[in-house]
Image (cartoon, grey):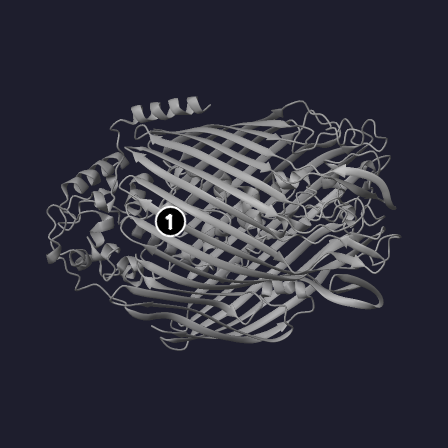
Amino acid sequence: MKWYRNYTRFICATFVLSAALSVQAAPWHSMSAEELETKLVDKFSAGKYSQKGADSCLMCHKKNAKVMAIFDGVHGQVSSQESPMAGLQCEACHGPQGKHNKGGKEPMISFNADSKLSVTAQNTVCQGCHNDAQQMAWHNSTHNLEEIACTDCHVVHSAEDPTLDQLTVNNTCTNCHAKEKADMSKRSAHPLKWDQMTCIDCHNPHGSMSESALINPSINGTCYSCHAEKRGPFLWEHAPVTENCITCHNPHGSVNDNLLNSRAPQLCQQCHANDGHASKVVPEAGMNAFGAGASCLNCHSQIHGSNHPAGSLLQR
Amino acid sequence: MSFKLNMITLSLLALSGNLMAADFSVHKANTSSVNAEKFSCKQCAYNNGYSGKMSASAGYNDVDDIHAGNALGTAEDGAIASVSGDVRYQSDLGYQARFQAHQLGMDNSFATLKAGKSGHYSMALDYNSIKTYQAGDVESQLWHHNGLLTPSTSVNRFDLALEREKFAFAADYQRDFYQGAIRYSQEAKTGHQAASLVTPSPVNFGLPVDSTTKQWDANIGLNGDNWLTDLSYSGSFYSNDIGNLSLPYLYDVYAAAPDNQAHQITLSGQYLVKSTVMSGRLSTGRMIQDEDLIQMAGNPLQNWDGQIDTLDGRFTVSSMLSSRLRLGGTIDYSDRDNKSTTAEFMQYEFNGLTGAFKQNTPQDITRSTYKVNASYRIASGYRAQAGYDRKEVERTYSEREQTNDDRFWIKLNVRALENFNIDLNAEHANRGGSKYEADKLTSSEQNALMRKYYLADRTRNAAELKLTHTPLDWMSIDVATRYAKDDYDETQIGLTESEDFGYDINLNLHFGEHITVYGFAAQQWINSEQVGSQSFVSPDWSSEINDEFINLGAGVAYGGLMENKLTLGLDYLFSNSISDTDVSADLTTPYGDYYSYSHSANLYADYELSALMALKLSYRYERYYDTDAAVVGIDSVPGLVTLGDINHDYNAHQVMLSFTYKLR
């Protein structure tokens, strides 16, 4: 039981420490969200910027490693005219200093998780510079309507923004999209689990003018960008295939092979009840040619379309 | 509808008036009192020069089944090595570069080099290799050479695996009010995939894959204070080096995927008026395929002109009418106009030419979608959203030429509670449409009671609840649960109902500076029922499919050992996919085993040799098992030749030692 007592002490000590840290709230913590926003808008309009720029801020904040990490990335570059550090410096994003440095009682624009400033207002800071074609559909995007802050995904005070790295972007997305994270481990899935593909290969997290924020105007167009052999057009089309790939497939993963919503022959028999073998019951897998091997696809293997003149049954 | 939307737009514009939300854009800053010359940054840390790290790894793979290569990065059995790195450069003149490489030398790897001047221009070179393994040492008695599949008594052994190797070049340039970019990529896809041909009895075989897809993308954009516009072109060219396949006694038995190309030009824009944002897009495209057709009796054409013209348009408006209320609306139009040649072609039936002719049926599809939504802040920390979506689809050559999907949804977001976030979503949707009737081409064949599930009347109800709880600074727990039910009430033959429900839980703990612990669990169930008719009259058999998925994971990282130089970590993941089917005709019989499970573990020790050098020793374990009762021996079923046992049951191990050198 000794380990249990030690563990209990450890948990208690950590709890007390965390509680102690949490009471160090900013003086403006008692302001309501509306009061805070009004105050910051007034400060922004008054435009009382510091006399010395970043040095005025770093006088107090230099010991904070997270603050200083801004210089590791592009937002801390003085040499680039586009960088905030080349203009109003820290105050380009955090707003004019005003009387913040006089006792630290006046709020600044803050982007951390505890910030009471509305997400919409926070995001205007980023959008002031990052307003290009990639963000064109942001305003009506799900992420905007769900009030996702730019800083929920992007890290500015860092050499490396996790959303800009193939090895970390999926992790950023699945921090919220837990179901899709689980889908990656299903029997069949695109290779997202190992970061060989990324969520942003198909979706634009800033929104798009397509269904499900896809990067292409259509679902099928998005699939064809990697599966061009299925684009055709084919002489003999399979109607649900040309209409929508997700009629049969779930691109996020499936307990069935080939990302299929159901396996053959059941999936096929959900649409085909022709007079003949398609209507026959297949009582058990592996018993006969209708249930063994590739099932219906043993014969109808050109399921995505055939270019054979005699291929109307998608057999050739 | 367009008139209605115009009225909505005008109403939003009128209502939005001067209700401006806070805007802290830097270009709206009041800089009248700023004296930039006095700005200094003596305390700033200028990290110019090189930074980052490079690492070299060597190790050993113990792999019996190439399927393990999916998880381990390579299916190589024996000694393995790779190089990785992430190096940045920035100069005091604003130039910057980044080189990133991930396990170069292994089957799955990538490298990217990007350089340029921040905010002005950049160029990038990318390399990406993805290899996916389905099964190794698959056996077939067909040998492929120049389009001929030759049967032989000697066994052809090959891997069912596909490798995609992609190279890309990109460049972009931007100035005050304009920007442009161009990108070219070329992807080669090689390997084998499972396929089947009719001889006339079915024979599964390994279809050789050797194709190239070239892609061009270019765009130019202009922007002003309150508007943006962008014109882009995208072109894709697919070329297949594998032609039509023949058997020595049966020519052109399998048609190759034809070369094809697609082009798309898109004009999009955004306009802001006070707190109203309007955006739109118009996209026109063409897909072309004009490969020579197989020449045979009953084919009147040398080559078929396949052409599909697409037109996609969208207009969206979103407006903050007050600090509490946001309204939005969208109209979306998508048209697929299949202009391909039509002709009558002689068709095969099971045992040869019958003389039956059939005309190809190029399908046109038109979709129109209308959406309206509202978001209202009820009180501080409480927000409600609601919306209505309607999708209308028209299609030719179909049993149901028009379908309409209506969907109502609501969301409630609660952020007012201390340490708790709550999100509740619910939706109700209905699909209806024109009269369902077998089309002229198939009416004599299809059971009149069949309702294809993607065309059938459907009622959908769904709900989802998400809770995010942060009881302590060092602890967070997320819980989500969801349920959805689809009822196909008018269907007597086909899919009649489907339900999908599950939950996921995520726990994250940060015990101080050095210890991080996480765990997650997820389960999902998908149950569906379908009905068939052997007698071709009324339902006389049914299937019940019960899918289940379990996903469990946990990990710990401890970084406080040996004066903070040593970090130990463990990650573990378990997944289990199960699909049980019961078929009921005269008797109820289980369809057979169809499941898979895997255990993945990664144990590592990361030791800092010095401020610039580090060693990492890692051990990865993969246990994978899958089974499918449909997978049988090559000739176990009379009249069918399969690829044999391609189920998996293996343990794989990987040990790697990595040396990392930090540039700063």
Residue visible at 41% across and 62% down in the picture:
B124
- Residue B562 in view here: yes
Q: Residue at x 81, y 64 (%)?
A: B150
Q: Position of residue B6 (x, y in %)?
A: 39, 24
Q: Secondary structure at mark 1?
A: strand
Residue B115 image offset from top left, x and y in percent: 36, 64
Q: Nearer the viewer, residue B127 or A159?
A: B127
Which percent across, then down, holds residue A46? 14, 41
Front residue of B240/B126: it is B240
Residue type, numbered disc 1? Ile
| Label 1 neighbour load within 10 Å: few <14, some 14-19, many 20+ | some
* Horizontal arrangement in the rendering, residue B393 relative to residue B265 (left or right): right
Q: Is residue B20 above or below residue B354?
A: above
| Residue drawn 46% across the image and 28% down it | B387
As rendered, which of A301 and B426 lies closer to the eye? A301
Residue A66 can be seen, yes or no: no
Q: Looking at the image, how many numbered discs can be counted on the residues?
A: 1
- Chain identity of mark 1: B
Q: Give the residue displayed 54% in from the left and 57% down from the top.
A: B214
Q: Which residue is mark 1?
A: B220
In the rendered image, residue A272, in percent from the top left (x then y), is placed at 75, 36
Q: Is residue A51 left or right of residue B491?
A: left
